[in-house]
Amino acid sequence: MARVKSGFRKRFNIRYLRWMLARATIGRIPALQRRYSFYPQAILPEAAATTVLEDARIDLPTLFSAEETDFVRDRCWLYDTLAGTWEGGPTVRIARFSGLIRDAVLLGHVSRIFVPERHAVVVALAQKGQANWNFAKPGKLRPAPSIGGRSFFLMRTDNYYHALFHDLVPIVDYLDRLHPRGMPLTLVVPKSRLATLALGCELIARRFPGVHVAELADDAVAPAAEALWLSFDGGNAEWTFADPAPVRHLAEIFRDHYAVPPGSGRRLFFSRGGSKIRRLLNEEALWEIAREHGFERFEAHAGNHAEQVRNFSQADIVVGVHGAGLGNLAFCRPGTKMIEIFPENFTKSTYLWLSKRLGLDYAFLVGGPGDYDQAFMLDENLFRSALAGALREPI
């Protein structure tokens, strides 16, 4: 099975053993915990919040067709992250929570909010009151200036999709619906190799009065007078916050920044290029088929975000292998066709869910089995038929 580690490999490696040793030593001695900012205890945001802004439970329609429901339940659920117990019904129970945590501490090395009064880090899914090794690590942190007023601490990520839909879209939604207009809000940005994350925060700050941006280094710790927490839980970590209004508002903010003109008619063959993960072994043959139908090949990278926004904004159809770059579907117009390609042994429902939320016309193609790096082949006749059907053109 591609890129899935066994329980043995997850637990018996140097990183995990080092963390377990730290938890058994530093984690049991309060003085050392404070010295190394290592807090293995976890608390749910609902318990940490001193003020609740929103706490809603909604039965949200999945909008899946019968074929899509079978695909998600029978194939994707095995690979979707933290997938719960959805049985394939027409709705899913989601929970949205927004709250304020007063007198908090922001830990740069784990990008977590720490609540001194509860002696715990805030984690959306706190398993038995324990924080896992991503949210609790020992590190000697230097004090940073206090952050007055209200602040939002972004998740540290180098994943483009997560930056858009776990950080930037929820911020825009909060500012549009819940934040008192003009009230100061500091977006605290952790260090990231993903320039889009910092740029998005800067653009949001320009758009909304009272919002400004501050960076918190990995080796820094800062007191925060009032930390904002935003959660969305659909019982499946692939089903992220994606209401149309804030997604389209964020897309508008980026398009305005890059001066992207309105347009349509483009057909994108979205390539993963030289990526090690999930390579299409017969990409050149598939590209030749796509080119016959008027497609242009495009690859996203750190230096061409303006092109990403423009190309997806003007696309009538996008064809591409599952990956973070498909987060650019945020910029597509309703009705845009999306054909997502998977290896047989790694199918996820991330962009099916997103497409349904944004009114895109979604289809999927499943190729052969992927190797450890998920490299795989897609049947060329299947691809040719899918393109012709989507475009209503001769095969």
Image (cartoon, rainbow, N blue to C red):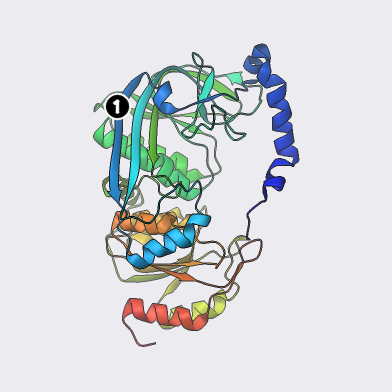
Quarter of the image with the N terminus is bottom right
| Spot occupied by residue 287 in the image (x, y as percentages of width and height) | 50, 77
Residue 134 in the figure: left or right of residue 316: right
Vertical side of 4 occupied by 217: above or below: above
Front residue (pair 137, 125): 125
Give the position of the C terminus as an image quadrant.
bottom left
Of residues 268 and 361, the one nearer the viewer is 361
Q: What residue is drawn where x is 57% and y is 70%?
A: 280
Q: 128 above or below 313?
A: above
Q: Secondary structure at mark 1?
A: strand
| Residue 152, x across and y down, in percent | 41, 29
Residue at the disc numbered 1: 53
Residue in view at x 49 percent, y 36 percent: 155
Q: Nearer the viewer, residue 280 or 54?
A: 54
Nearer to us in this view, 12 or 19? 12
Q: Is residue 265 left or right of residue 364?
A: left
In the image, residue 86 above or below residue 215: below
Residue 141 drawn at (x, y percent) = 62, 21
Residue 381 appears in the figure: yes
Which kind of residue does numbered mark 1 sit on? Leu
Residue 362 in view in this figure: no
Which residue corresponds to the image point at 51% horizontal and 31% vertical from the top-left?
126
